[in-house]
Amino acid sequence: MPSPVAFLSHADCGRHDTGWGHPEHVGRLRAIPRALRGDPELFAELLHAEPRRATEDEIIGVHDARYVRAVSEVAASGGGHLDADTVASEGSWDAATAAVGCLLDGVDMVVDGRAQRAFCAVRPPGHHALRDRAMGFCLFGNVAIAAHYARAKHGLERVLIVDWDVHHGNGTQALVERERDIRFVSMHQWPWYPGTGAASDRGPHNSVWNVPMPAAHAPDVYLNAFLKAVDAATDGFTPDLLLISAGFDSLAGDPLGGFTLEPWHMAALTTQLVERASSWCGGRVVSALEGGYAPDRLGAACALHMRALAGLTTFGP
Ligand SMILES: [Zn+2]
């Protein structure tokens, strides 16, 4: 029997309280088990696990120690603003370390064979977080930390990170671009927040593929552009692990983006990535939630994304 797909979520991720009216709220996470309950076949297929929280030491190194301790202190003192649109509450340290822990456990599980793939339903998201500061709703670079961890802890050499969130994964890029054997593909709306991610920005080792795209194109245009970049990034580079920054704000109708994807487009993209991962590295994939601000759409798309990760049939319009 093939190894299952792990569904990793941690109750502490709900304790990051961004305040009334903030788009990055706990309702986003609650939509995911709600969608899973509507899909008993998928629910039964998944290996449900609550992972550990990451330790301070596992985050320091990728992030600046002073910044990591500052997040801990702000949370311990009851919370506060970390940047213009990023807040920490009393529960944010536990939430942010749980989010990183989900990713690290996901990596452990796909490497030791307990699972073949994993989806991490986490918040706060991570792909805007910089080495020494929070940004864009993100505290720690969940996926970037996982990439470094996979190499340091498990001795994997080459890691590919792909990011289909509607915003440029500027934090991920900053945290991995100095490492030649971590390659990063980000497709994002352009011009749009955070303003980085030009196609000409390839990082110091040409290990970054940025795919800036206008809003309101037909879905296939986005899918083709993304997969073309993935194929360019893996020309002569065979990943030992694929990490997905799964941002669902690239769905049509998201309040923070202008892309046109439907949940089944994410499933189709996932299937394409799983096929490639199967030829690269025995199908090892760890995917993590990034953005996505229409909770019901987010839940539906996460469920289809997990169906595709599990190799179950997905359905179109
Ligand atoms: Zn986003």
Image (spheres, rainbow, N blue to C red):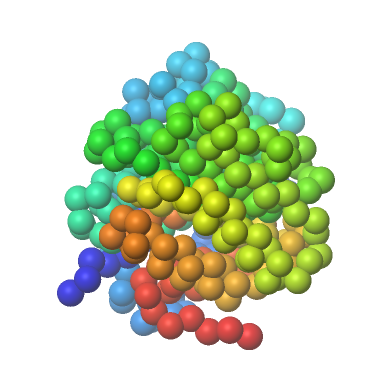
Q: Confirm whether residue 50 shows in the render.
A: no
Q: Residue furthest top?
A: 66
Of 40 and 115, which appears nearest the observer?
Answer: 115
Of 16 and 280, which appears nearest the observer?
Answer: 280
Q: In the image, residue 89 lies at what x, y percent?
A: 57, 34
Name the residue: 34% across, 23% down: 57
Q: In the image, residue 140 lies at what x, y percent?
A: 51, 33
Q: Confirm whether residue 130 shows in the render.
A: yes
Which quadrant is home to the N terminus?
Answer: bottom left
Q: Is residue 3 left or right of residue 120?
A: left
Q: In the image, residue 176 lies at what x, y percent?
A: 50, 32
Name the residue: 41% across, 21% down: 61
Of 43 and 88, which appears nearest the observer?
Answer: 43
Name the residue: 54% across, 24% down: 131
Which quadrant is home to the C terminus?
Answer: bottom right
Name the residue: 74% across, 62% down: 259
Say above or below: 139 vs 57.
Answer: below
Numbered circles on residues, count: 0
Q: Is residue 220 left or right of residue 208?
A: right
Residue 94: which quarter of the image? top left
Q: Is residue 55 left or right of residue 20?
A: left
Say above or below: 20 vs 8.
Answer: above
Of 176 and 1, which appears nearest the observer?
Answer: 176
Say above or below: 201 vs 166.
Answer: above
Q: In the image, residue 138 lies at what x, y percent?
A: 59, 37
